[in-house]
Image (cartoon, rainbow, N blue to C red):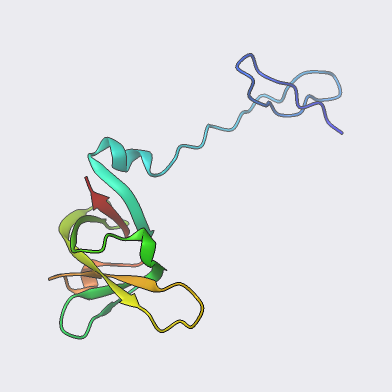
Amino acid sequence: MPDWGEDVDGSSRLPLSSEGAAPAFRSAPVEDPRASWHAAGMGKRLLVVKEAFAARGGGVELLPALGSDQVPPRPFAVTLRAPDGSELRTRASAVVAHARGPLPPLAMIRLADIPVEAVPPGSEICLDD
C-alpha cells in the first residue's frame, strides 16, 4: 500500500515513490461548478438540460424531471446558461405529474416564450435570486 502522506493543511498527497520523493506533478483542486452561479448573483442550479421539446400550449419543457419538492410551486424567474456561455433570463413554471402510483410526483420545468433551439442539451437552468 503506498504512503499517501499528508500536506500541512491536512489534504492528501500523491503516493511517495520508493525513494521517498513525490512525483513532480499535482492535480489542480476541483472547483464546485455552481460557485460561478452564486458569484454572478444567480441562485440554486435546478438542472442541466438533457432534452428540450416544444410544449403543448407554448413554451419549452425540459428533461430531466425533478421531484416536485425541488421546484417552487408558483412561476419563478430563471437564468438559462447555454454551453457556449450565453445567458438568457426568462420565466419558468413547474408542470407536475401526479399519476405515479406510490411514487412521489415529478415536475418538469417549462420555460415561457423561448424557442426549443434556444435550449441546447447541456444548458444549465438556475433559479434567480
Q: Quadrant of the C terminus?
A: top left
Q: Give the quadrant of residue 19.
A: top right
Q: Quadrant of the N terminus?
A: top right
Q: Is residue 99 above or below residue 38?
A: below
Q: Residue at x 19, y 59 (%)?
A: 76
Q: Give the quadrant of residue 12.
A: top right
Foreground residue among 91 and 105: 105
Residue 1 in sight in this render: yes
Q: Is residue 84 above or below residue 73?
A: above
Foreground residue among 79 and 26: 79
Q: What count of labels does the image hold? A: 0
Q: Give the quadrant of residue 72.
A: bottom left
Q: Residue at x 50, y 75 (%)?
A: 103
Q: Is residue 121 above or below residue 55?
A: above
Q: Position of residue 43 (x, y in %)?
A: 28, 45
Q: Position of residue 39 (x, y in %)?
A: 28, 35
Q: Residue at x 53, y 32 (%)?
A: 28
Q: Position of residue 75 (x, y in %)?
A: 18, 63
Residue furthest to the left in view is: 113
Asked if residue 57 lies left or right of residue 61, the reply is left
Asked if residue 27 lies left or right of residue 57, the reply is right
Residue 50 in sight in this render: no
Q: Position of residue 22 (x, y in %)?
A: 73, 22
Residue furthest to the front in view is: 102
